Image (spheres, rainbow, N blue to C red):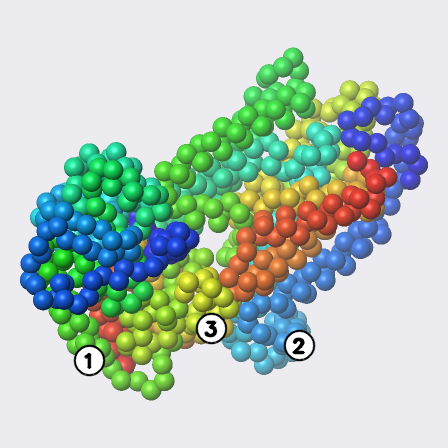
Amino acid sequence: MPNRTRAPGQDVVADLPASVLPRVSARRPVLVALAALIGATVLGVSVGPADIPLATIFSALLGHLPLIHYHSHVSAIDWDVIWQIRLPRVVLGGLVGAMLAGGGAAYQGVFRNPLADPYLLGVAAGAGLGATLVIVNGSGTNVNHLLPFAAFAGAVGAVILTYLVGVTSGRRASTASIVLAGVAVAALLTAMQTYLQQHHEPDLQGVYSWILGSLGTASWSDVTLVLPYVTLSAVVLFLHRRLLDVMRVGEEEAGALGIHAARVRIIVVAAATLGTAAAVSVSGLIGFVGIIVPHTVRLLSNASYRVVIPVSMIGGAAFLILADVAARTVQSPAEIPIGVVTAFVGAPFFLFLLRSRRTGVL
Amino acid sequence: MSRTPRRLVLAVASTFGLVAFSTGVPGSAATSQSSTTYPVQIAAANGNITVPVRPTAIVSLSPTATEMLYALGAGGQVKAVDSFSDYPKSAPRTKLDALNPNVEAIVAYKPNLVVVSGDTTGLTAELAKFGIPVLSDPPATNLDQEYQQFAELGRATDHVAQAKAEVTKIKGQIARIVSSAPPHGKPITYYFELDQTYYSETSSTFIGQVLGLLGMKSIADAAKGAAASGGYPQLSAEFIIKSNPDYIFLADTICCGQNAKKVSQRPGWSTLRAVRDGHVVGLNDDIASRWGPRIVDLLRRVANSLTQHSRA
């Protein structure tokens, strides 16, 4: 890697090579991240309050694979625990983790800001308001069904509002005015959400446990709910990984290289927002993943978005699956909010990494 | 949703060290007289309080206390009840907030007795400035404490004999329900659901002890940290499925619209013994979160589900 490690936002057009993008191989980091994901998945499926031996789990899964005529002797209850409780939880954790980490990496790219996370433009505040509205107003039955949709709508609505305000204010649509609009929109929506929750004290616990995030009631229907959005979002972000690399030199400079920066930005933000909104609508607001995972990838391997985007997604999936294992085992059968785990485990690890790689890329 | 989750009330109360339960005043004064001589001293959970005159304007900030006051015939003296006090229907329900009481709004009713289920905001001291006594009757941890609170309220409101009669009536009803419940060999296990995040109750809680009269045992007893949680541990779907209880009692029917059908549709729950045998019983959330006179109704409903079971 020749001297390509500049802070995003720094104008480095001077040493941009004519070929624009140096060769970068993502194969090794991708393989490492995949290994971590497989390890996390095996752990996620094998750990839980119901003691089911690993051999039983594999024989059960093998027995249910299509085309393989293998008969496993697993009790119906054990099978339900594996198939209906643990597996959807692991899969959902993986999807949400991948989306939050990938979304964070993309936001950091388009806004050329290392502190950007998927909640930068108001996704969290909007989703929180939508969820709170349903929890405090919903009567019984409807809450569970409406909540993901309300959170999704709130999240997407907040980002649209941010974008409209940000793009129309200032002389031209600069990233700074969009980010500032995001801060203001988030503050406004959070104020409304706080007002609502304080006026419905009996629902306080429901609101709080949603805000702190949980995969405790994950089911296959949640997985099918978010899968299309996460897939679409992941594909779009993956296809834009090279453009994000070019954008690192600055929007005007990218423009000089023939890239329509504003268009790239809106496509990437739209994709990241859709995916993130879908993720938080089923998992609640899980913090920190979107910052810590992409930066860990940058510190450990490479700052190119051709590496950061795919490896963050795979690594984010592994990280959140592991965080969820901790969330549900430390005080089993009670659960710790997963957002507490991601910050509690993630922050010290990240600080350690930051110190040990002082010459890093930030 | 319109109930104060019992768990929340308990948590708040215990945080502030207020679950030092009212000792009442057993013995002479309470039991020998049939009417109260004012001023009367009552040793309550929030200290020794003095009710100077026969209360004619009671404000109740506790749904359970409201039910008790009406059950012992003091309903006519009740002037205002809090927003959660939805039973009996004739109680003068107001917007008063029991969890975050507004002193000025309470004083506006010119009460001469205020009944609460816990004081975390210093209400007792605030109202003392206005010479208004506050009687705290916190969540009962067993039936004896419930009976004691009846006696306490009876003494404070000049309904000593009625309070005694009400307790005798409840005791009799419970004894009849228990004696007519079908006999069974080993304990019947149950999962008691407080909400959809699987918070539950152990056999040592108020409800747990009441169901224990029927020889039932909560699966939450085996949960790690059950005692540390004050008897209200959070379980997980996996824990419940693996425990495979004989019965499931839903105390989230009103708040969260849960019922037997919904439970059977939860992923992984359809093979549970309780679901297969049709032993998923919906309970009234409010009754299940209170420690008042309607506990008899709850016990009867549970006992009936056992009877149907033994016939089948």
Q: Chain of mark 2?
A: A
Q: Chain of mark 3?
A: B
For badge 1, the amino acid type reads Ser
Determine the CA span between mark 1 and mark 3.
29 Å
Number of residues whose C-alpha sits closer than 10 Å to that of mark 3, classed few (under 14), some (14–19) or many (20 or more): few
For disc 1, the marked residue is: B180
> From this viewpoint, which residue is outermost toward the bottom?
B185
The x and y percentages for residue A142 are 38, 48
**Count of marks placed on residues:** 3
Residue ID at (60%, 37%): A119
Label at residue A257: none
Q: Of residues A133 and B94, which is closer to you in this image?
A: B94
Comes first in the chain, label 1 or label 3 = 1
For disc 2, the marked residue is: A55
Do the residues marked 1 and 2 share a common chain? no
Residue ID at (43%, 41%): A132
On screen, residue A1 above or below B200: above
For badge 3, the amino acid type reads Ala
